[in-house]
Each structure stands twice: as structure tokens, then as C-alpha cells.
């Protein structure tokens, strides 16, 4: 959303009881507009309002990433890394004990 349309867009959202959050600090890379966070359930209603009022919105992304799946993957990664490190340490210790005998 361009800054010139910000007040119009926000007043339209408020008139239609649509919850939103705007953040000017969290801009997309090379973006001069304002980022709005909207609920997926209001998407069709917002689309109709944008068309009705001839406002141009740029969609950066529709879905938020699933952080719980990323956490699971990172836990598996750390587990495998720890197993590899422990095996390497065991080999080093075993080799040191063997070379002393």
C-alpha cells in the first residue's frame, strides 16, 4: 500500500470492522509502502473493498511460515550434529588410549 493511500485504506478497514496492524518499520526489501498484517478470513472482503475504492495493494506474501516445523527440523539437525561430534570425540579418545598402550 502506498503512503498516499494509507489513510483511505485504514479508514475503510475501520468502517468495515476489519482488524489490522500496520508497521512502517518492517518494510519489505526496497519497498516504500507500509506493511499491513491482516487476517486470512477477511481476505475476500478486503479484496472487494480495494476494487470498490480503486486502491492498489501489493501482496508480499499470503502465508506465514510454520515455525513449529522449523523447530522440529532444527532439533533433528542438532541431534545429528551432537551424535557426530560425540562419535568423533570417542574415536579421538579411543585412538589416544590405543597409541599409549
Image (cartoon, rainbow, N blue to C red):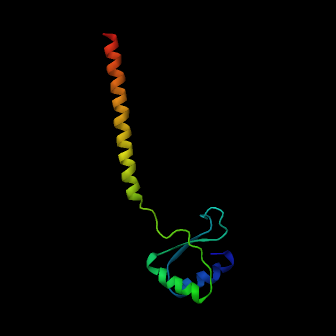
Q: Nearer the viewer, residue 34 or 69?
A: 69
Q: x, y (%) of residue 84?
A: 36, 35
Q: x, y (%) of residue 41?
A: 43, 79
Name the residue furthest right. Answer: 4
- At 65% from the left edge and 66% from the top edge, which residue is drawn? 31
Name the residue furthest top. Answer: 101
Q: x, y (%) of residue 32?
A: 67, 68
Q: Does 99 appear above or below 83?
A: above
- At 34% from the left edge and 24% from the top edge, which residue is drawn? 91
The tally of labels here is 0
Side (left or right) of 70 relative to 35: left
For the C terminus, which image quadrant? top left
Q: x, y (%) of residue 64?
A: 46, 65
Q: Does 100 appear above or below 10?
A: above
For the N terminus, which image quadrant? bottom right
- At 55% from the left edge and 83% from the top edge, which residue is drawn? 13
Side (left or right) of 48 relative to 87: right
Side (left or right) of 79 relative to 55: left
Q: Does 36 appear above or below 7?
A: above
Q: Does 93 appear above or below 5?
A: above
Q: Nearer the viewer, residue 19 or 47?
A: 47
- At 48% from the left edge and 80% from the top edge, which residue is drawn? 43
Amino acid at each position: 500500500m502506498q503512503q498516499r493511500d494509507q489513510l483511505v485504506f485504514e479508514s475503510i478497514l475501520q468502517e468495515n470492522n476489519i482488524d489490522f496492524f500496520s508497521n512502517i518499520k518492517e518494510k519489505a526489501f526496497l519497498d516504500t509502502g507500509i506493511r499491513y498484517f491482516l487476517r486470512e478470513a477477511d481476505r475476500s472482503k478486503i479484496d472487494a473493498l480495494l476494487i470498490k475504492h480503486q486502491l492498489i495493494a501489493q501482496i508480499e506474501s499470503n502465508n506465514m511460515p510454520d515455525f513449529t516445523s522449523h523447530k522440529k527440523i532444527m532439533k533433528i539437525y542438532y541431534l545429528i550434529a551432537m551424535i557426530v561430534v560425540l562419535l568423533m570425540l570417542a574415536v579421538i579418545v579411543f585412538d589416544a588410549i590405543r597409541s599409549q598402550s
